[in-house]
């Protein structure tokens, strides 16, 4: 049962694989951002990093909770606008914004941007001038604080494609250029250290470093940042044994540090922004699969194949991510069976879990993989022409479909066929 709904009923209604999202868990997390940050401290704001799961049903909850969102592509902008997210609650990030991205944003009334590099200063200024609109900008700078659970999701070090370097004067040049650029209203600075961070210390160090940069910028250019966005990266528990970051406690430490550091320099406290993605949605999600082949390789291991895999959860293949797997149809049975849980795709890297201890299962059983709400649906693919699963929201014994399963026809919707060459 999940939120009072049986997984067998969900299977019968929607089929598998199926992404299941707990509405109460999502609401609880959004409430915590409100209570432990937005309402607790004046002059703060929070963006949902929508790359974690960019669907209308999640946006509805995020909007109701009073957060705004960040997007990194024209696609994410379009989906958000389509979902009814007001343009003034959409902030555009990204390290390689195209003319089309910026034009699309401006034409749709989106005027909050985080500028990532020198090229974007001129590009955004020029396009904003053409359209006759003013845009609010933050400059993303490299904090030189490294964090994150895997190399692929670390962004804060010197050697990164993201942001203005700070080990030389590039960021100071960027500040000066932005101050002079037509139609750009410089609001402050931004950073993002990495993702799936479990140590509050990393956020504390980030705040200290960023406050120091604000001071150096003041001294070197005379400009005082009104806004400091410290990014996302708040870690979650994937496994029962994980010790996840305490969000409320981290925010208390961050804000205490900030006040102390700013006092030291004596400039006004900037408006503080955060942009959690994973932390809001990961633990609200789970993926339901049906077991197919169970293959024992004698003396080696047993493979349990499910009807999805790396197409709906690429994270084990990309980041060696680990997940807890539950045999949902054998909850009362002893976990005596060690298995490698694999998907249905044609490659050996198609793994859900390298080693799970579950009760013995057979074809037709259901497996539930926990904590798949972030970067699963949003990173899903059609490799092997697998169909992207449906998404269902569950709450108080009820369920509702929020994204339908792809159909076979969807797979050929973009193909141009029948033309002679
Ligand atoms: N802000 C910026 C500028 C970011 O680049 C990111 C994530 C976030 C916020 C949100 O980070 P979060 O709170 O979700 O950790 N696909 C990877 C994660 C990539 C994160 C990229 N940027 C994964 O599945 O672990």
Image (cartoon, rainbow, N blue to C red):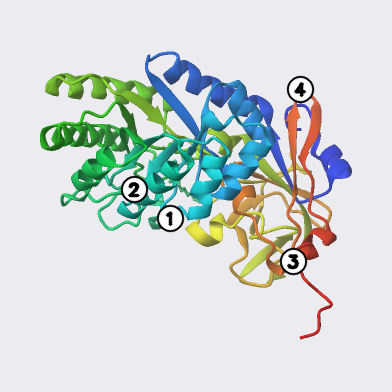
Do the residues bearing badges 1 and 2 touch, measured as CB atoms within 8 Å? no
| Mark 1 vs mark 2, CA separation in Å | 12 Å
Residue 232: percent from left, percent from top: 42, 37
Of residue 396 and residue 71, the one placed in the foreground of this image is 71
Q: Which residue is mark 4?
A: 396
Q: The N terminus lies in which quarter of the figure?
A: top right
Q: Earlier in the sequence, mark 4 or mark 3?
A: 3
Residue drawn at point x = 43 percent, y = 42 percent: 128
Above or below, comparing residue 318 to residue 147 in the picture: below
Q: Earlier in the sequence, mark 2 or mark 4?
A: 2
Residue 268: percent from left, percent from top: 22, 19
Q: Earlier in the sequence, mark 2 or mark 3?
A: 2
Q: Which residue is mark 3?
A: 385
- Which mark lies nearer to you, 2 or 3? 2
Is ligand 1 within 8 Å of the beta carbon of the residue shown at mark 2? no
- Which mark lies nearer to you, 2 or 4? 2
How many C-alpha atoms fall within 10 Å of the one at disc 1: few (<14), some, or many (≥20)?
some
How many C-alpha atoms fall within 10 Å of the one at disc 3: few (<14), some, or many (≥20)?
few
Above or below, comparing residue 122 to residue 45 in the picture: below
| Mark 4 vs mark 3, CA separation in Å | 35 Å
SS at mark 4 in the image: loop
Where, by quadrant of the figure, is residue 96 drawn?
bottom left
């Amino acid at each position: 049962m999940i939120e009072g709904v049986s997984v067998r009923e969900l299977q019968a209604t929607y089929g598998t694989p199926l992404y299941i999202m707990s509405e109460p868990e999502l609401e609880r997390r959004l409430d915590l951002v409100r209570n432990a940050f937005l309402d607790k401290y004046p002059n703060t704001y929070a963006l949902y990093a929508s790359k974690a799961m960019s669907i209308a049903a999640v946006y509805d909850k995020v909007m109701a909770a009073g957060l705004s969102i960040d997007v990194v592509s024209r696609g994410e902008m379009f989906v958000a606008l389509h979902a009814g997210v007001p343009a003034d609650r959409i902030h555009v990030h990204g390290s390689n914004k195209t003319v089309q991205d910026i034009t699309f944003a401006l034409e749709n009334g989106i005027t909050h941007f985080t500028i990532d590099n020198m090229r974007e200063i001129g590009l955004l200024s020029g396009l904003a001038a053409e359209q006759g609109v003013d845009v609010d900008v933050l400059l993303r700078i490299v904090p030189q604080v490294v964090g994150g659970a895997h190399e692929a999701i670390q962004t804060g070090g010197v050697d990164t494609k993201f942001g203005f370097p700070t080990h030389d004067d590039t960021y100071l040049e960027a500040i000066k250029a932005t101050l002079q650029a037509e139609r750009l209203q410089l609001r402050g600075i931004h950073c993002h250290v990495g993702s799936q961070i479990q140590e509050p210390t990393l956020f504390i160090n980030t705040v200290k470093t960023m406050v120091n940069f604000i001071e150096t910028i003041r001294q070197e250019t005379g400009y005082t940042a009104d806004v400091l966005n410290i990014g996302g990266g708040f870690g979650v528990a994937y496994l029962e044994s994980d010790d996840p970051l305490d969000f409320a406690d981290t925010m208390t430490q961050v804000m205490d540090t900030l006040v102390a550091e700013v006092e030291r320099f004596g400039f006004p406290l900037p408006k503080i922004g955060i942009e959690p993605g994973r932390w809001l949605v990961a633990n609200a999600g789970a993926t339901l699969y049906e077991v197919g082949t169970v293959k024992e390789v004698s003396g080696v291991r047993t493979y349990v194949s499910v009807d999805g895999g790396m197409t709906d959860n690429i994270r084990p293949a990309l980041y060696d991510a680990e997940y807890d797997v539950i045999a949902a149809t054998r909850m009362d049975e002893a976990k005596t069976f060690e298995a490698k849980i694999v998907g249905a795709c044609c490659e050996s890297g198609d793994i859900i879990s390298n080693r799970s201890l579950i009760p013995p299962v057979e074809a037709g059983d259901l497996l539930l993989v926990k904590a798949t709400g972030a970067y699963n649906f949003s990173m899903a693919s059609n490799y092997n022409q697998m169909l992207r699963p449906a998404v269902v929201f569950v709450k108080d014994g009820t369920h509702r479909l929020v994204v339908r399963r792809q159909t076979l026809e969807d797979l050929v919707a973009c193909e141009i066929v029948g033309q002679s060459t």
